[in-house]
Amino acid sequence: MGLDMTLSGKRYIRGYEGSPESEQKLYKDTMESLGLTGVGEGTHMYVTFTAMDWRKCSAVHNWFVVNVQDGEDNCGSYGVSREQIGELIDLCERVAKSGDPEYAEEHLPTSMGSFFGSTEYDEYYFEQIDETARRLAEILTQLPETPDFFTNVRLEYSSSW
């Protein structure tokens, strides 16, 4: 067992008559690719995908607990805004660039838990933080920036141990 963390994306797709043709086509194509032709025709769906996952990266988990989950570390799912992801990217970039264990401990501290992994500010810690910044930045560039519910991808963070 260990601390498993996931940032998921969720996209609403309309298949209703009267919906934009591109949405209806996306709905139909998705249903067909799942082998579900004729099932739920003309309704809607949510497509959920894993945008990023981590294992035993307690510093990033701790950041989500404090900044997204209001201090509640309860293995729930929590909505995450683009702005919050941007803040995390910025913080991870600064910490990774510093390479300084004291700076890391002050700004992006690890947390202790039976299955949370190392609490050391070592090479592995800084590699995880750097990879988090790079991958999250890539994710944000691929997600639509529109606040439109119908084309937006909603992000959710969850963890388990």
Image: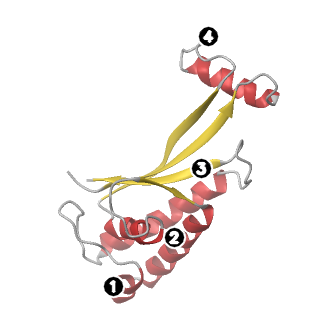
Q: Position of residue 116 (x, y in %)?
A: 24, 63
Density class for disc 2 (Cα within 10 Å; few <14, some 14-19, many ≥20) is many
Residue extending farthest to the top is 38
Please, what secondary structure does the residue beneath circle 4 have?
A: loop
**Which of the two labelled residues, at mark 2 and mark 1, occupies the earlier sequence position?**
2
Density class for disc 3 (Cα within 10 Å; few <14, some 14-19, many ≥20) is some
Which residue is under mark 1? 101
Determine which of the numbered discs, if any, sits on residue 88 in the image. Answer: 2
Residue visible at 54% across and 69% down? 89
**Which mark is nearer the camera, 2 or 1?**
2
Task: Measure the C-alpha gap from mark 3 to mark 1.
Answer: 34 Å
**Which of the two labelled residues, at mark 4 and mark 1, occupies the earlier sequence position?**
4
**Which of the two labelled residues, at mark 4 and mark 3, occupies the earlier sequence position?**
4
**Which mark is nearer the camera, 4 or 2?**
4
Which residue is under mark 4? 38
Task: Measure the C-alpha gap from mark 4 to mark 2.
Answer: 43 Å
Please, what secondary structure does the residue beneath circle 3 have?
A: strand
Answer above or below: position of 110 versus 40. Answer: below
Q: Dots 3 and 1: beta carbons under 8 Å?
A: no
Which residue is under mark 3? 154
Q: Position of residue 99 (x, y in %)?
A: 40, 82
Q: What residue type is disc 4 on?
A: Gly
**Which of the two labelled residues, at mark 3 and mark 1, occupies the earlier sequence position?**
1
